Image (spheres, coloured by chain):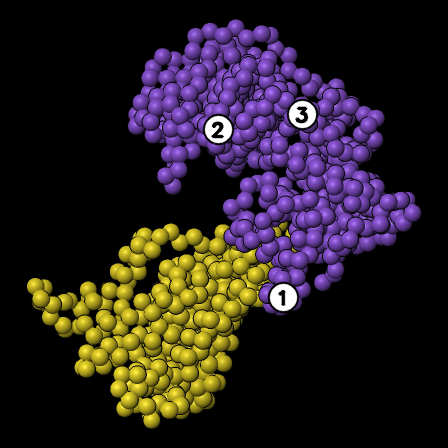
Chain colours: A yellow, B purple
Amino acid sequence: MESYFWLLSLLDSTLRLAAPLLLAALAGFYSERAGVVDIGLEGKMLMAAFAAATTAAFTGSALAGLLAAIGASLAMALLHGFACITHRGNQVVSGVALNIVAMGLTAVLGNAWFEMGGRTPNLPAAARFGEVTLPLAETLRNVPVLGSLYYELISGHNVLVYLALVLVPVTGWIAYRTRFGLRLRAVGENPAAVDTAGISVPALRYQAVLIAGLLCGIAGAYLSTAQGAGFQNNMTAGKGYLALAALILGKWKPVPTLAACLLFAAADALQTRLQGVVMPGIGEVPVQLIEALPYLLTVLLLAGFVGKAIPPKASGRPYVKER
Amino acid sequence: MHAVTVTPAPHSPPKSAHQWAVELVGIDKRFGPVHANKDVTLRFAPASIHGLVGENGAGKSTLMSILYGFYHADSGQILVRGREVEIKGSQDAIGLGIGMVHQHFMLVETFTVLENLLLGHEGGPLLAPAVARARREVEELERTFGLEVPLDALVADLPVGVQQRVEILKALYRGADVLILDEPTAVLSPPEVEQLFRILERLRAEGRTVVLITHKLKEIMAITDHVSVLRRGAVVAEFATAATSRQELADAMVGRKANLDVEKAPPQPGPVLLAADGVNVVDARGVTTLKNACLTVRAGEIVGVAGVAGNGQSELLEVLSGMRPFASGRVTIKGTALEPGGTYDPADARRRGVAHVPEDRLKLAVVKEFPAAQSAILGYHEEKGLARKWRLDWKRVTAKTAELMERFDVRPRDPALRTSLFSGGNQQKLVMAREMERDPDILLVGQPTRGVDIGAIAFIHKQLVALRDRGKAILLVSAELDEIMALSDRILVMCDGEIVGELSAAEATEGRIGSMMAGVAETATGSVSGEEQ
C-alpha cells in the first residue's frame, strides 16, 4: 500500500511537472507545423513567467498575472514573426536572440524593480493559481484504490494543469478536423501550394506564431504563479528546449508529444525521489547523475530509439515566391 | 466559395457568348533591368488548346504568372470573357475561372488527394462536411473528364503522372474554365504524355480552354490548335498549328535558321573503354536502386541511356563517375577492373581519364555563387599550371577560363561574372568545356541540354559528336528521347533500376523505347506513341 501511494505521488508530481512542458510543446506544435521553427519557446516562457510574477505581485491577482504573461509572450512572438515571416530572417537565429533578450531583460528589470537579486517577491496564495478540488473528491477519498486515485492524482491540481491536458485533444481536433488545421499543416509542408490556392502564407504563419505566443504565455505564468510563488532568475532552466525535444520525440503530433512530455516529467519527478537512494552495488547514486537523467534520456531517445522524426518539410524555410 | 461547374458549359458555338476566353492586351513587365514582357498581346479562343513556345527566359512563365496573379503587370489589360478584370492574387484568378498546373507541382505530399483538392476551397470552418461534399463533386468531375485518381491515397505515394492529374483535377475543382499548363510533359514518360493529351482533348471537348507552355515543338504540333511564339519577352509569331511546321516554329523561336538535326557520320567503334558487369547499388534505405547493370561503351561511340527520371540512370552515372560506391559487380575502365569497396572516387576517375558532366548542373557541376573562373576549375584545381603547391594561380585560372569561354562560345565572356548570372545554356557550355578540355577517353554526360536553349543545344550536340569522332567513349543519359535518338549509336533503356533492353540506332523508334521505358513488354506494333511528322 505504501508503494501504491509512493507511485501515486510520483504520478501526481509528474503531471505538475509535465504541464508547462506540454503547454510549450503545443506552442511549438502550432509554430512548427506552420513552418516556423521556434527555438524561442524558452525565452517566451521566461519573459511570461517574469511578467506574470511581477503583475501578480503588484495587483495581487493571478488572472492579471496570466494576462500580462500572455501579453509579454505575444509581443515576443510578434517580434519573431516580424523577423522570420515579414523579413524572412533565419528562424533559429531569431529564436536564440529572443532567448538571450529574455534572459537579460528579466534579470535586469527584476533587479531594478525589486532589488532581490533578480527574484520577485513571494506571492500570497491569492495571487497564485490554487489547487482545484474536483467534485466529490472529498467524499470518494476513502474509497479504496479508485477513490484515492481520483483524490490524489486526478483532483487537486491548479486550473492550468487541466487546461494543458484539455489542450491536447483540442489541438488534435483543430489540426486534423478544421479548415484552419488543414491550412496550417499545408503551409508547413508546402507553402507554395497554399499560396497558389489563394491563401496568404504570411497571415497563416502569423496566426500560428501568435498561438504559440499565447500558449507560451500560459506556460510561463504556470511556472511563476502556479507551480512557484514568484519569479527566479532563469527559472525556465531549459524547459523550452525540453519541450522542443518532446515535440520532436512526439514527431510533431499532439498525443505522442503528450507522451513525451509525461516521460520527461516522470524522469524529473523520479530524479528528486532518487536522490540519496543507495543502489545495490553502486552505493549512493551521485546527485549530479540523477539530475542529468531527464537530459540523458532525451539524448538517448533522440539518438534513434524512436525511429526517424521527419519534421514538416518547409520548417525553417522562409517562403519566397518563385518566378 | 463559388460553385463548381460540373455540368458541361454550353460552349458549342463559342462565338455567340464571347469571342475570346482570355485576352492579354499590351502586357508589359520589368524586373529591374530585365524586360521580361514587352507589350505582349495574346488571345485565347474558348474550347481550344493554345500553345505558347519560346526559349528559356523568353517570358512565357512570367506572362502566365501575371495571368494567374503571381505578379502584377506594369501596364496592359487582362480581359476574361470580354470583361476587363484586375487580378491581384491567385484568389482573384481562381475566382475568374483561371487555373494553373505548375511545372513543380503545388501539392502537399503528406496529404491525401482529397485534402489537396480541398485546400483553399473548404467551404466552411469544419472539414467533415467539406470532405463529403468534395468527394461527390470530384467524382462527378472525374467522370466528366476521364481523370482517374485515387482520392484517399497519399500524394507522396502516387506516380508523377497521377500527381499531375491531381493538379488538373484541383484546378477543375476550383472552377477553372481556362487551364494553364507549364511544361507539363517534362516529367512524364511517353505513354503518360499520351494520357495527358487525351485528357486535354477531353477538356477541349467539354468547352474548356487550355494554354500549353512548352519548348517541345513536337507536342505543339501534336495537340494544339493555335500557337504563339515568344522571343525575348515579345510575341514574334502566331500560327494556326495546322498551317505551320516544326522548322518554322524553331526558326521563329531562335530568330534565325535553327538546326534541328544532328549531322553525324557512321560510328567507327574501337575497343571497349568502359564496361559494367552485374553492378548493384543499394541506397541508404536498403533499396536496390541499380540492379545487375551490364553495359559496354566502345571508343568512338555514343551509348544513350533512356528512361523516365528516377529509374536508376542517376545511380548508374554516379557509380561510373566514382560518386557512389557499388555493392557488388565489377566496373572496368580501360581494361582495369574495379571491385566494390575500392578507392575509386571522382578524383581517381579523372586521373583515369573519365570526365563527368553531371545531371544536376547547379547542385553538382558548378557553385552558383562562385565567379565563372572558379566554377570552371572545380575538380581540376590541383592541376599543374593552375595550382602552385598549396595556392592557386588566379591569373592562370582566369586566362584559362577566358580561353575556354572563347572556344565553347560561353556568353558573356567574363570569367569574373558570378556563375548564377549566366543562362542555363552558357553554364552548361562552361561545364562541357571544363570536362572536355582535358581530352578524356571516357565522357559521362547526364542531361546535357536540360534548361538549355535551342541554339546552345545544337552547339553541345555538335561537341559531343566531335568528341566521339575523335575516338572517345561517351555514355549519355537523358530524359529527352529526341536527344537520345539523335545522338546515340546504341540505346539502352532503363526501367525500375534495370537495363531492360538495348536497341541499335537503326531499330530504335520512339514507340519501342517508350514502351520499354514504361516497363511494358515490347509489342510488335508499338502503339503507345504519338508519332507525327
Three-letter code for the amino acid on which mark 3 is drawn: Ile
Image mark for residue B313: 2
Tell me the residue at 38%/20% (across/down). B277
Query: As rendered, which of B232 and A291 lies closer to the eye?
Result: A291
- Tell me the CA gap for discs 1 and 3: 51 Å
Query: As rendered, which of B169 and B379 lies closer to the eye?
Result: B169
Residue placed under numbered mark 1 in the picture: B129
Q: Position of residue B528 (x, y in %)?
A: 64, 28
- Tell me the CA gap for discs 3 and 2: 24 Å
Image mark for residue B454: 3
Task: Mark 2 and mark 1 in contact? Answer it, CB < 8 Å.
Answer: no
Q: Quadrant of residue B346?
A: top left
- Image position of A64 (left or right of A287): right
Asked which secondary structure carries label 3, the reply is helix
Other-residue count near label 2 (Cα within 10 Å), few / some / many at <14 / 14–19 / ≥20: many
Three-letter code for the amino acid on which mark 2 is drawn: Gln
Q: Chain of mark 1?
A: B
Q: Earlier in the sequence, mark 3 or mark 2?
A: 2
- Tell me the CA gap for discs 2 and 1: 46 Å
Q: Chain of mark 2?
A: B
Query: Do we see residue A290 in this rendering?
Result: yes
Tell me the residue at 76%/55% (across/down). B5
Q: Nearer the viewer, mark 2 or mark 1?
A: 1
Q: Quadrant of residue B505?
A: top right
Confirm whether circles 2 and 1 share one chain: yes
B326 lies above or below A315: above
Three-letter code for the amino acid on which mark 1 is drawn: Pro
Query: As rendered, which of B206 and B290 lies closer to the eye?
Result: B206
| Quadrant of the image containing the N terminus of chain B | bottom right
Tell me the residue at 11%/70% (across/down). A278
Tell me the residue at 44%/78% (across/down). A163
